[in-house]
Amino acid sequence: MRLVIAALLFGMSLLLVPAQAASFSCEAAETPVEKSICSDETLSAMDSTLALAFAHAMAGLTEEAGIVARQGQSDWLNYIDTVCADENLRRGTVPEFERPICLRQLYLERLAILEQNRLVHGYRFYTVDRYAALANDNPEFKVARKVTSSLRIDGFDAFALAFNAAAAEITTAYSGKYKDFAGKAADDTKAQQDNAVLMRIVAHNDALLSVRLDTARYNHGAEYDTSFGMFHFWFDEARPLEASDLFEQQGWQETLAVLIAERIAPDILYAPAVDAADVAFAVDDPLQWSFTDAGMMVEFEPGQIEPAGSPAVVVPWSVLVDVMTFRGADISIWN
């Protein structure tokens, strides 16, 4: 498919493209996807925006990283050709009306991934992306969509090497047949299920980088499950954060559990209050921790705490002082 390929390889020329124009010549459009983009003003604008986003994503990458980035984009182009093909659209729909809806969703998803290609704390991040569409005999869901996006650093110092190894290991651990962060079994090889595994940068300061891995799966016509895990990396020591880096005072687990429980308000009327014992399992698990200027946030998966739903609570730094290490102060200011 010719769709935006030339423009993607020569990104700077895209600055001359009008805001509402596709990134390729509509006079030469041949494929159903190309014709759909050219006939839909919203899609045409999205195609131009995506081409610019990819040009920025490619900017400054080494040759090796650039090859990986271009492969991901090429795979995505083939992916949308398959997912939004006439034979794979929903049963009983008119392709001319259904295809633009299909494409808009895929464009939005791709733009969100391309936004992760950026400079953070002096490190050039890019994504390693995998797209697949498996044939399915369900007339309503004729293909299973498989998307994996993992972060990498285009560099070779100690932190870059350690982060890249960890990111690859994390992504592999949540691919194929695995258990998600909530402990539910998943299998992204099934043709009856859509799967997404997406890694993104959440926050950073001078000491620490935080990334989040979200997993999602949709059993066609049935349940939709999501799960997440937070991963934190020290810049100076080139290693993941451990609970003992932040807390080591006697009894810190019990203190933190009480502080978390106090901030959880059950969202079910007349539900019993949540106590420290209900949240103890998450106290020493950085996978559920996030860090903000306001304090340490602890997020729970749906169903982990009943009947409180899936709350996210922030424990202010000021009330954690008594149980925090000196190193903990390094992460109390965030960008």
Image (cartoon, rainbow, N blue to C red):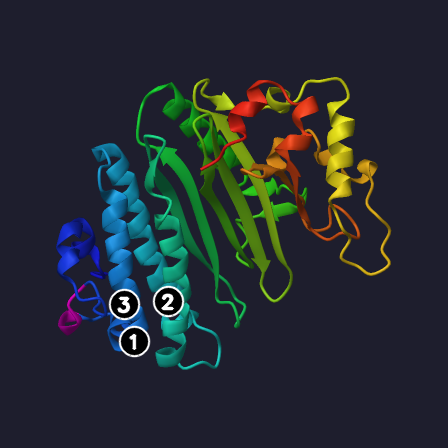
Amino acid bearing label 2: Leu
Q: Give left or right: position of 113 versus 186.
A: left
Circle 1 SS class: loop
Q: Are marks 2 and 1 in contact (CB under 8 Å)?
A: yes
Whether residue 131 can be seen here: yes
Q: Give left or right: position of 319 versus 94.
A: right
What is the spatial separation of the Cα atoms under label 2 and label 1, in whole angstroms? 11 Å
Q: Could you tell me which residue is drawn at 53 percent across and 72 percent down?
A: 140
Q: Position of residue 41 (x, y in %)?
A: 28, 75
- Disc 1: CA contacts within 10 A as few (<14), some (14-19) or many (>=20): few
Q: Give left or right: position of 95 versus 134.
A: left
Q: How many numbered badges does the structure rendering display?
A: 3
Q: Position of residue 245 (x, y in %)?
A: 59, 20
Q: Could you tell me which residue is drawn at 43 percent across and 27 percent down?
A: 206
Residue 103 shows which numbered tag?
Answer: 2
Sequence-wise first label, 2 or 1: 1
Comparing marks 2 and 3, which lies closer to the viewer?
3
- Disc 3: CA contacts within 10 A as few (<14), some (14-19) or many (>=20): some
Amino acid bearing label 1: Asp
Judge whether 24 appears above or below 249 on screen. Answer: below
What is the spatial separation of the Cα atoms under label 1 and label 3, in whole angstroms? 9 Å
- Disc 2: CA contacts within 10 A as few (<14), some (14-19) or many (>=20): many
Question: Which portion, as a residue range, is magenta?
Answer: 24-28
Screen quadrant of the N terminus: bottom left
Predominant SS along the magenta part = helix
Which residue is nearer to you in this view: 138 or 238?
Answer: 238
